[in-house]
Image (cartoon, grey):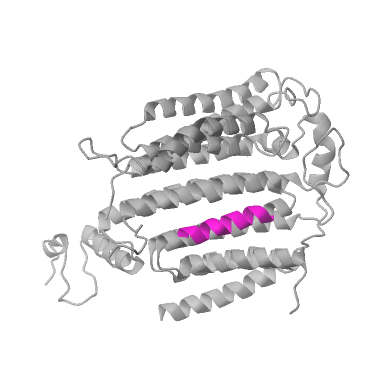
Amino acid sequence: MRRLSSLLFLAGLVTLIIAIFQPLPVGTATPAVGTAINHAAPEQVGAANLVTAVVLAYRGFDTLLELTILFTAAMAAGWVLDKPRNEARPDPDAGFILLAASDLLFPLLLILGLYVILHGHLTPGGGFQGGVVLALAFFLPLLARPGRRIDHQLFSLVEGLAGAAFIGIGLAAMLNGQAFLAPLFGTGELGALFSAGSLPLLYIAVGLKVGSELAGLLAHLAETEAVG
Amino acid sequence: MIIPDSNTLLLIAALGLILIGIGGMVLSLHLLRIIFGLALLESGANLLLILATYSDRSVAPIIVGGKIPAHMADPIPQALVLTAIVIGVAVLALALSLALRIQRAYGTLDVRELRARLDQDIAAEAGINLPHSQDAPRSPAVVNAPGGAS
Amino acid sequence: MDWLLLLLVSLMLGCAIAVFLLDNFLAALAAYSVVSLVLSLLFAFLRAPDVAMTEVVVGAALGSLFFALTIRRLGLGQTGDES
């Protein structure tokens, strides 16, 4: 009976979704606001990557709210998970391949993560992608050697400082007389590394915050007690 | 065989992912598969957002070499989907942590059993009787309540 | 180009259905990773390189890692070889 009602619901949902989304102009869309931003962004913001300009300059407040959501989810997950008991026997070290690979990959992933963060305003990438790569770089040694507990206090400290730096840069724009999170320091030359004002600084803060947050969350998930 | 043209194919892909996600969530009996369905639903919705402003003759919104192309793709939905993907994985992490807690508290992840156990627990907390058979074991809170089970 | 797109979309939808039909949870996780990977290829085709990079890092890598850790902690990670 439950299956029958579920199938009826799905049939109705299929009809509704096809009826709503069928006239969507896929492939022939003419966005008005997007074209305006594409014309105005290179002179106003100075970033070669226009998506970065939208994320940090035109919709910077949305990025702040996203950081808040990430912080809330990571904090709640850290509370919900059980802490490992101190006398519990830790898992053994992983095999040779994972040990060697984690030792070799750690510096490479660090370089890749920092490169993606720092060049977020020039090439595709930015704080979120680079931050996740940094989190994976710090989590890989924990996966290879589960016995070595990491320092959660250090991750929380970095996360807190990076989040405060993001808000601090936003408030500095207010002290300058502009709106909250308006870009500072001029635009610079399009395509150079030191361009687009305070956007690289904002992305560095975002990258460090996201990286340390997700590394702490992954460590909590890996260290929790085995269930069932 | 007739191949639909690429725009229709992409729309079918996005709507198909959404429907498979919702269908899996509704028809599954294991909590972990419901979480898989949630992740698929979010992926399908993100693809639909990018498809809404996709234009065949546009290029990526990145300026390379100083020349600004004439037709660039819309950067606003791309920024929104960037945000949405990261939020989706945060929600996924919280859902999986809650699933781990549920497994520890109730010992099972089967949705039907969880529903029955939750009904029993809520009734035990409230002190009321559930309308099920008399032979089923009652929790001590219901048996010892002043209104009392028979 | 249309043939390639048809192949990718059918692979993605097939693996999306396979997530719910496979019994082994590790196999369902592998199917979900394939969906995420093909989705990032589609994002790159749709003139959205930023979104493609985010999807491959967050969806295919981080999401699958979360699922794999949870499956291991739940004890559902048998590959079917042990009796």
Asked whether residue A76 is in view, the answer is no
Span of residues in magenta? C29-42
Residue at 88 percent of width and 44 percent of height: B70
Looking at the rendered image, the quarter that the N terminus of chain A falls into is bottom left
Residue at 44 percent of width and 47 percent of height: B93
User: Residue lying furthest top in this view?
Assistant: A176
Q: Is residue A90 left or right of residue C28?
A: left
Looking at the rendered image, the quarter that the C terminus of chain A falls into is bottom left
Residue B122 falls inside the magenta stretch: no
Picture coordinates of residue B18, whole percent (x, y): 59, 64
| Residue situated in front as seen by the camera: B6 or A47 | B6
Q: Is residue A60 left or right of residue A28?
A: left
Residue at 72 percent of width and 36 percent of height: A123
| Residue situated in front as seen by the camera: B121 or A223 | A223
Picture coordinates of residue B150, whole percent (x, y): 11, 72
Q: Quadrant of residue B42?
A: bottom right
Picture coordinates of residue A79, whole percent (x, y): 35, 40
| Residue situated in front as seen by the camera: B122 or A154 | A154
Picture coordinates of residue A150, whole percent (x, y): 36, 31
Q: Is residue B119 left or right of residue B35?
A: left
Residue at 38 percent of width and 27 percent of height: A153
User: Residue lying furthest front in this view?
Assistant: A96
Dominant SS of magenta comes to helix
- C70 shown above or below A139: below
